[in-house]
Image (cartoon, coloured by chain):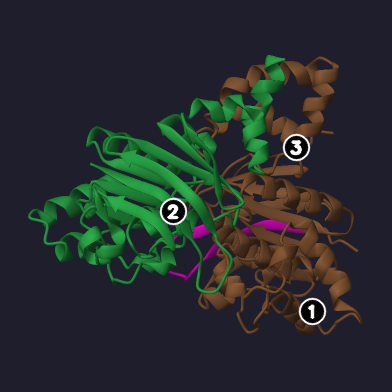
Chain colours: A green, B brown
Amino acid sequence: MSIELRNVSFSYAGDRPVLRDVSFSAEQGGFLLIIGQNGVGKSTLLKLLNGILKPTSGQVLVNGVNTATQPTSRLAKEICVTFQNPADQIFASTIRAEVEFGPRNLRRKNVDQLVDDALVLCGLDALASHHPYDLPSAQRKLLTVASAIASGAPYLAFDEPSAGLSQIERSVFEGLLTALKKEDRGMIVVSHDLALLLPYATAVLILARGEMIYYGNAEVVTQQDGLIRKAGLRLPLPYRLEKLFGK
Amino acid sequence: MADRIVIQSFSLQYSATTPGVLSSVSLDIPSGTCCAILGPTGAGKSSLLQCLAGTMQRHHPESVASGTIQIGERLFEALPSHVLFPSVGYALQDPHVQISGVRDTVFGEILFTLENTGEVPDEPAAVILPLLRKLGIDHLADRKPTSLSGGETQRVALATILVAQPPVLLLDEPTTAMDLAAQEKLRGILRGMKQSTTIVLTDTQLDFALGICDQIVVLEQGKVLFDGTPAAFLRRLDEFHTSLPLENWLPLRQQILRLLDQPSRLGSRLALTLGLK
């Protein structure tokens, strides 16, 4: 059981390639953190995972099934992807209806339980009857995460899930990551927020100029400055200070 | 010329029957400095910026405010009744909303701001392209503004405000989608603008503010919990761990204080990195 990319390249119609020859595999219980500069193709990569986009060449295999041959609706049973901008996906008129949409359409058996659990995990249970657009933007992010969790999919892929979260929602988010780990879900997360997410990562993939320049264990990221610089990135300020003090 | 901002005993409710959003806020932001307003979701950060931008009544027509806001020579009893652009530039929290999409290219989108201010230079490219270069997005000049990635969109949205060179610049969580290298670029730009611009930015965390801001304000539930220099904030860091994500900062606190208090080459380097000089 895994999500596997084999030599995947992708270009939007008539444009130069966004991704070139990307290969990795993500397992259940694992946490793959994908990092790279703005515009490098991270969000595009996530959209390839559940078949919203199909590779120009190479293969994306979800539990061994090639996404090119499957409708997104079938792949959604296995992997749920959230978008970077919550406004791109939120459509229902209550928070509960929004979270319920996935599991109901996927014909999960215990819809109410899945929805209740996801709402509690994301700290939204008391707000279930509210309109999603009554939520501050940070909580709208958590709503998209709640929808993904409630889908019951064994693999979850989040696009910048912690962007704009304040301390209140960050604590909630850390709690749900720990819970998802216990449930043995497979996590694939695109983020710039190394300070929050690196401690959870079991593997890191670094993209630069559309290519994978690193795929391996997470510790390397803070230890090898060259790698981060090669990707055109910087380490968070506290990490850099730690190094300064270490000298 | 940059404007000084003085807010006195300012309180705000979205309507007469709803709870207070801002409660007796008083702040003095000197001309040509940068003030970071930090705090958790719901603290009132964006609302405060909307009041300063003159857009609060657009969002909440029934809002009730008291106190005064002074921006440069202009004194407002309670809320400004009109949008203060272009003398106050306001970059919205959601960059997708900022981009009008009325033009087909990023260059055109930014030019549109200049057209709105009525001050289009003879050679707009000589103003726009260097700004795009400084933001690291010159390669996007001919792209469709609605086809960009999240971080690219955020930088283009900022460019549409920065290009007007407003004497007061309000930035609502300006770096949420930006990679850290892009954040460094923006820091550099803001440092360069400070002489001629008073900058007020909001954030939910500390990292971006350090190195550019001269003043840190911690806002929680509409009240000012702290108002002081970055150095004073770092000394009291442990008081704010429930308001801000400081878990990576707290272990460094003792070392930071020691270096600040004992002159050394490392201490000076640190002070420079954190913008404490």
Instruction: Give percent across and percent down for residue B226.
Output: 64, 40
Q: Give the CA distance from mark 1 to mark 2.
A: 42 Å
Residue sitting at 15 percent across and 63 percent down? A104
User: Disc count in the image?
Assistant: 3
**Tag 1: amino acid:** Leu
Q: Amino acid at mark 2?
A: Val
Residue B196: percent from left, percent from top: 88, 59
Q: Chain of mark 2?
A: A
Which residue is tagged 3? Answer: B229
Q: Is residue B37 left or right of residue B260?
A: left
Quarter of the image where the C terminus of chain A is located: top right
Please state the chain letter of the residue tagged with numbered disc 3 in the rendered image: B
Examine the structure image and report whether residue A33 is included in the region drawn in magenta. no
Q: Can you give x and y, in whole percent of width and height, for residue B44 in the image?
A: 55, 56
Label annotation for residue A8: 2
The span shown in magenta is: B6-21
Which residue does the image show at 66% across and 69% down from the upper left? B78
Please check whether the numbered discs 1 and 3 fall on a single chain.
yes
Kindly report the distance in space between the C-alpha atoms of the residues bearing marks 3 and 2: 50 Å
User: Tag 2: Cα neighbours inside 10 Å, few (<14), some, or many (≥20)?
Assistant: many
Q: Tag 3, which secondary structure?
A: loop
